[in-house]
Amino acid sequence: EVQLVQSGAEVKKPGESLKISCQGSGYTFAAYYIAWVRQMPGKGLEWMGMIYPADSELKYSPSFQGQVTLSVDKSVNTAYLQWSSLRASDTAVYYCARVASGSYWPMNWGQGTLVTVSS
Amino acid sequence: NFMLTQPHSVSESPGKTVTISCTGSSGSIAGNYVHWSQQRPGSAPLTVIYDNDDRPSGVPDRFSGSIDRSSNSASLTISGLRAEDEADYYCQSSENGNWVFGGGTKLTVL
């Protein structure tokens, strides 16, 4: 069974750094992009970017380029999303998804990680 | 920038059929595959249609997708509506591997 398991909820203060994770299992982790999607409270889905674990090829949404960093550790089948300096506006649920090659459809989704940034 | 536009909300009665549209802003929506995800309240998204009209394993055949090239739009149709279909539905496509989401449509099953 394919699973994407994300790290738990986080509460941070503005200016702090954070790294959340998404661990894949049940498939060849390196062979599929992992995408990250933001959902702000009461809002829709926003694509942040994606990474190809085999070679760490990156695609960032222009809206998130320079704001976050995507990375992977193939040895533990895990993708990461990190911030160096959080803002209150980063408060959201973040989802990872396994992405099919070719048409880039989201084959599986993680359960989401709630990040709350508040002073 | 390529954009996808969906109606904000639709509603229909149990047992009926509902169609949700997704219109591309420019070019041809048919030039890139369209996928649809369902998000129930408090849950992660779930893909119900991929590559315009294919269903992932486990998704009921009450869900179907289509493309209308003449109107540059895609549609998600749900037949035999059930209370459990009440959710937000998002269309999504890719331009050069970059994802684009529609704004989402809230489906209410009356």
Image: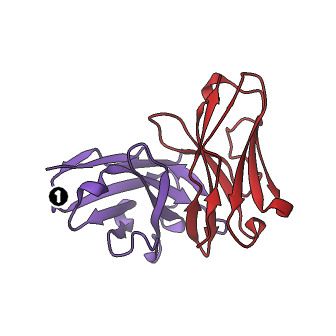
Label 1, on which residue? A14
Q: How many marks?
A: 1
Query: Can you give x and y, in whole percent of width and height, for residue A35 in the image?
Result: 48, 62
At a point 65% along the width and 46% down the height, the residue shown is B7
At a point 71% along the width and 68% down the height, the residue shown is B32
Residue found at the far right of this picture: B70
Local SS, label 1: loop
Which chain is tinted red? B
Query: Can you give x and y, in whole percent of width and height, for residue B66 in the image?
Result: 80, 52
Check the image and report above or below for B48 versus A89: above
Is B77 left or right of B83, judged from the image as shown?
Answer: right
Check the image and report above or below for B66 versus A48: above
At a point 36% along the width and 69% down the height, the residue shown is A70
What is the quadrant of residue A55 in the picture?
bottom left
Is A12 left or right of A61, judged from the image as shown?
Answer: left
Query: Can you give x and y, in whole percent of width and height, for residue A62 in the image?
Result: 45, 74
What is the quadrant of residue A15 in the picture?
bottom left
Chain A rendering hue: purple
Pointer 1: residues within 10 angstroms few (<14), some, or many (20+)? Answer: some
Judging depth in this view, the residue of B52 and A54 nearest the camera is B52
Judging depth in this view, the residue of B17 and B11 nearest the camera is B11
Judging depth in this view, the residue of B3 and A22 nearest the camera is B3
Check the image and tell me how it is coloured. Answer: by chain
The N terminus of chain A lies in quadrant: top right
Chain ID for label 1? A
Residue type at tag 1: Pro
